[in-house]
Image (cartoon, rainbow, N blue to C red):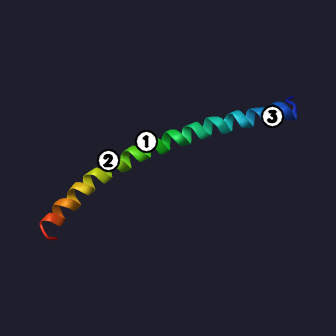
Amino acid sequence: METAGQNTNQVMEENDVLKQFMELLNQQNMKEQSQDFMVCGGDASTAFRNGG
């Protein structure tokens, strides 16, 4: 049977893994958003130059 200290340590390690995973997802999401922004930005500026 695990002691409370070992249990806490395991939970903290799992939290670290989750944090890293979330950061990775966020980075991926940011890349996709910036690509979307580039595409939308191009369309918006073209529409603006064409008056609408």
Residue found 28% across the figure and 51% down from its top = 38
Instruction: State left or right for residue 49 relative to residue 22.
Output: left
Instruction: State left or right for residue 39 relative to residue 29.
Output: left
Helix, strand, or loop for circle 2?
A: helix
Percent coordinates x, y for residue 17 in the rendering: 62, 35
Would you name the residue on which mark 1 appears? 28
Task: Please give the label number shown on residue 35.
Answer: 2
Crowd rating for badge 3 (residues with CA inside 10 Å; few <14, some 14–19, many 20+): few
Give the CA distance from mark 1 to mark 3: 32 Å
Q: Quadrant of residue 4?
A: top right
Percent coordinates x, y for residue 3 in the rendering: 87, 31
Q: Looking at the image, which is closer to me, 21 or 30?
A: 30
Q: Quadrant of residue 20?
A: top right
**Residue 33 against residue 50 in the figure, above or below:** above
Which residue type carries mark 3? Asn
Which residue type carries mark 1? Gln
Mark 2 vs 1: CB contact within 8 A: no
Residue found 38% across the figure and 44% down from its top = 31
Q: Upstream in the sequence, badge 1 or badge 3?
A: 3
Which numbered disc, 1 or 3, marks the residue closer to the eye? 1
Residue extending farthest to the left is 50
